[in-house]
Amino acid sequence: MEVKSFVNINLDHIEEGLQLAIDAKVENTLFLSSDALENGEAEYQLVEGFSYDYELNKDDFSLAKDHIVQPHSRKRYLGLISPNIYVGTLTLTVLKKDKEVGYVNVEVRSVKADYRDDYRDMLELITEKCTDLLMQANSPVTHNFETDFEKDNETLYQKFAFIKSIVATDEFAESVHRIVSSPVTKWKETSEQKDVRNIRRFKNSNIKELITGSKRTHLPDNHYLHNYGLKSLPDKITAVRKTDTVDTPENRFVKFALESFLKFVSDINKKARKESKLWLESDLLEKALESFLHHSIFKEISRPETLRLNSPVLQRKEGYREVLRVWLMFDLAAKLVWKGGDDIYKGGKKDIATLYEYWLFFKLLDLFKSVFDIEHKDISELIKETSDGLNLQLKQGNHTALRGIFNTGTRKLNIRFNYNRSFSGQKDYPHSGSWTTTMRPDYTLSFWPHGISEKDAEVQELIVHIHFDAKYKIANLTDILSKESEVDIDTEKNENRKGVYKNADLLKMHAYKDAIRRTGGAYVLYPGDTSVKKKGFHEIIPGLGAFPVRPSKTDDGINELKEFILEVIQHFVNRASQREKIAYRTYDVYRNKPQKDDEVNEALPETYGKNRSLIPGDTYVLVGFYKKDNLEWILHSGLYNARADCNRGSLRLGPGESGAKYLLLHAAGETKTGRLVKVIETGPRVFSKQTLIDKGYPSEPTQNYYLVYKIHEITEEELKNQKWDITKLEKFRQGRASALPFSVTLAELMKTIIKE
């Protein structure tokens, strides 16, 4: 790979003397590739994400304008090439006086050094998964394929890419090499005429020849065969010799498969526009297949009469089983139409980032199938027969839901896996979706309890969504997450002012987490090697982070993500988790819209320190009756007693009575009172009649047992010197019933405050 600061591309094939000059604005971003041809790429190579100046040496020529090429507004022979995220062969259309006269190809390389291997590996896995799904779906499949170029013109490169991904691999080449190095052979019998004296073993047919054979020689008179009636022997008889041959049914199949691949690729090459991306790649693959078939053993192998696909050799022996697998995939892949594939294949480009997103779908699908029980009928719907072929329904912008049930043994959870699910911003709480604008994460994994619909689970805050976004080109997420110094923050703000947002991926994760209702976490998936898990509080979710998932056949790193998913499931098994508590509180607080009557605008103690739990609607006040003779004892002893029997006037213990934080005292006829004291123990204790006497109770107790609250004077200034009109409380009763104790919330009580 030779680094260039500028290149002059000869365009004599368009017009003699015409040249295209391309200048690199940044060092090490323009190359002349020596291995371009063998990789099906253009010789002159740019790098994604950078811009280049170009100039044609004749001012009546220009390059066609598109989203990558921007000609100068007045000098049309000058302009700017900005590939942005485009990767692959870039075909530049050359115009003369605004009329199309030819093309020139340049290659746009990925910033990742190993993108060639990543692209091939990801495309191979997608093809394999698609054909597996086709077989699961029992789609109508025949094993004869003729290319219909008129019908398939729009998807021709896509289909070729599928085929190339399974044929043009090192594994396939190694499989063919194993076969030709150690082919399966069988014994073959060869007949020949041999001197009768050299025959060592006679068969029945040989004995007949001794009697009937021609060109005979007389035996001597004393020869012992005269006794058996033989007076002469033939000079030669037929002998059978066994030899090794490679012309076996299995080798015939291998030759047939290679010839089938070659015919498909050759047909495509003939139809493709010369020097186009499709023509270059198909030409390379055609030569590779021809080199396989030129091996000497294939000259001895005849065409197959039948295909014995159940042969143990084809199914088990190394080399043969791989060729059989590829051949079974070949016909299906050639028929497959992927509507979403235009995002990747159109014009011969290699949109590696989009391909990584699709590739991750199948990796996650495998992962979730290994953990959850996902229904096969949902998976099979990914492939449907359409008028133009077998269509893979996986398309960017459309969500595909795979559902299943996971039984932990102690809890059943509904599971739903979505690709590109949109969370609408049109509906208000408590509906599902975003509370701002519509958002669409790449992948969403949702959990909710078995036995309730997804819609009801959303309303009752019982569902949790975990989002994942594919970021092939991300390289600095872990650096962003570890920023701590003021210098880091200042640098980031300066870059933001220039329009450079290196933390955009992190901000998107925050957007998913904070805007999409019931989101438990949002995580980046990228082809790196470092995972990051940031917990919002103490438990695994809510959280943000990143997991490395690499396009590798040996070390894809997905086990780390699997461990995280299993940890999340274990978290859902815990019914006492903090997340469960928060989910219930959220549902309880927000299920009803606040009413005007719910407002509390009166002065109250601030909710910090010992008053942190002082929420007016959740704080209870016990309204209790006292006899005037007992008031001094109540205040002095710090005890307030209420009847604990079943007679009229006894205290009924409910949540408000048992959890009261304050006690408001009133006497007979006293409906406006300011005698508010604080309850300093949680719940009342039971005192016997004798215990009250021992505590100096001023009169003879009439009941055997009493509920007794421990109290203390209030210290909060906001509640001192206030009076409340208890007749305005809903539970207050007139007459003798006014002595019955009852509880109200602090919010209710504050509405009855007497303002002077």
Image (spheres, rainbow, N blue to C red):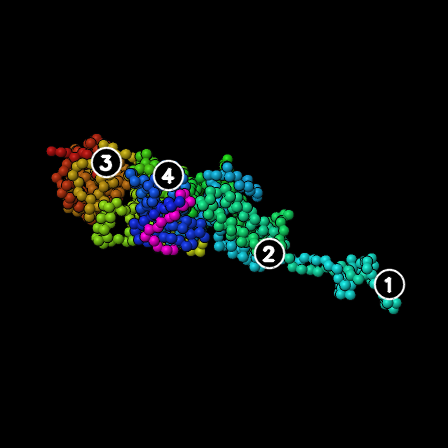
- Who is closer to the viewer here, 58 or 587? 58
Classify 35 as above or below 756: below
Residue on which disc 2 sits? 297
Residue on which disc 4 sits? 96
Looking at marks 4 and 1 on the same chain, the residue that comes earlier in the sequence is marked by: 4
For residue 194, side relative to residue 731 (left or right): right
Tell me how many marks there are.
4
The amino acid type, in three-letter code, at marker 4 is Lys
Segment colored magenta: 1-15
The amino acid type, in three-letter code, at marker 1 is Lys
The Cα–Cα distance between marks 3 and 1, rounded to whole angstroms, is 143 Å
- The magenta stretch spans residue 171: no
Mark 3 Cα within 10 Å, few/some/many (few <14, many 20+)? some
Quarter holding the C terminus?
top left
The Cα–Cα distance between marks 1 and 2, rounded to whole angstroms, is 48 Å
Mark 1 Cα within 10 Å, few/some/many (few <14, many 20+)? some
Element type where label 4 sits in the image: strand
